[in-house]
Amino acid sequence: MQQNDSAAERLRRWRMALGGGEADGTGVQLRGDDQAIDGALEALYDAERGAGLGASQPSIARWLGDIRSYFPSSVVQVIQRDALERLNLRQMLLEPELLAAAEPNVHLVADLLALKSVMPARTRDTARQVVRGIVEELLRRLANPTRQALAGSLNRATRSLRPRHNEIDWQRTIRANLRHYQPAYHAIIPERRVGYGRRRSAAHDIILCVDQSGSMGTSVVYSGVFGAVLAALPALRLRMVVFDTDVADLTDDLHDPVELLFGVQLGGGTDINRALAYCQGLVQRPRETTLVLISDLYEGGSRDEMLRRAAALVASGVQMVVLLALSDRGAPSYDHALAAALAGLGAPAFACTPDLFAELMAAAIERRDIGQWAAAREIVTARGEPPA
């Protein structure tokens, strides 16, 4: 009896995998939830590309509800992304009722940002509410770990080693100079003075330079969230720059990441050289500046001029890091030759997941070797080759 049950279960699984029709060969008739699940999948994977899920809104909304009922969130996200591409369901995001039913995740935010220019007025408020909910959830998840990861690095960076007399931290200064005690004089020679960190400017400058071409959607979302968190840290001075063939400075919007994200124009071409030229003008203290270029490096501008500009930034003392993606996905598609050329100039290039971004920033603030930091975490970096 158990063998028969096992054989029937295998046939049922094959039927679900093969999708039915005359060619599946199982002869299994689905019932109940199995039939409903098969119907939801058939509407997507057996339909003609671009056919949609039916003309009426309730049909699409019901389909969205079905897949959320029958599959875990991670699978829903995969099916939803497939639906957007296979069935031209971007239209469903243009209706408030359907938008509210969509599975909330960072990819949905990227889709909404890409669609905002064609979104009717009745949908924009709903879109903002959906985006705000997702962004607030990301902030809850990422803000505290980011602050904690950076706390020690910022404390060390703000501690001045050339303090004025009234800024000297005598306790730390004495400890730092105990080896210089002179018995004959019963005195310590303070070769190194440590201050309280009452500096007139931020301890470290960070410039986030983010490619807003269509392929970088999720990276833009995470960059906006992290930008808002970093901008709130008093020991940092952050500039947020986004670019395609034009450059936009969104620093003034960092207090509200939702407004910042809606200021992004996803899509268009890519002119990294132009963006680096703008960022170069922002650098005031090269040795205390980290420039994070977030791009897949498919340059539409002058490649040679861009490399010369990157070389000048690195030579001036700026710590330049290239993130080929800032997202939960695996290895991105990127220009391997350009990544290798930048790495050869001293700007390591690799993809970074959100859970490691704060740690990366801490390493940058401490001026650690970013290539070694990445290697220690088994992150694959572009192999550095001097540009031709």
Image (tube, rainbow, N blue to C red):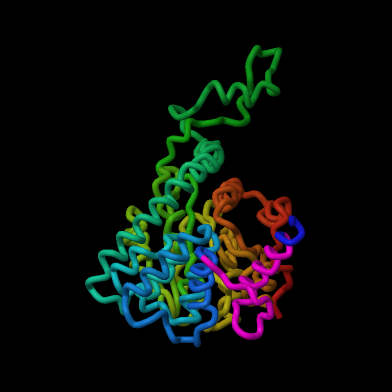
- The residue lying at 56 percent from left, 59 percent from top is 318
- Asked if one can make out residue 382 in the rendered structure from this viewpoint, the answer is yes
* Residue 13 is inside the magenta segment: yes
Q: Quadrant of residue 385?
A: bottom right
Q: Position of residue 154 (x, y in %)?
A: 51, 41
Magenta stretch bounds: 6-31
Q: Is residue 34 above or below residue 147?
A: below
Would residue 124 appear left or right of 205 to someone viewing this image?
left
Task: Answer with the quarter of the image where residue 242 lies.
Answer: bottom left
As rendered, which of 247 and 65 lies closer to the eye? Answer: 65
Residue 19 horizontal/vertical position (percent):
60, 77
- Looking at the rendered image, the quarter that the N terminus falls into is bottom right
Residue 360 place in picture, x, y as percent: 59, 52
The residue nearer to you, when weighing 185 against 83, is 83
In the rendered image, is residue 273 in sight?
no
- Taking the view exactly as shown, the residue that stands out farthest to the right is 3
Q: Of residues 58 and 355, which is closer to you in this image? A: 58
At x 53%, y 43%, the residue is 150
Viewport quadrant of the C terminus = bottom right
Residue 115: quadrant of the picture:
bottom left
The residue that appears at 49% across and 55% down in the rendered structure is: 206
State the residue in front, 46 or 225. Answer: 46
- For the point 65% across and 12% down, which residue is it? 186
Which residue reaches farthest left?
A: 122
Give the answer, above or below, for where 283 lies relative to 167: below
Q: Is residue 1 magenta?
A: no
Residue 278 position, x and y percent, is 44, 70
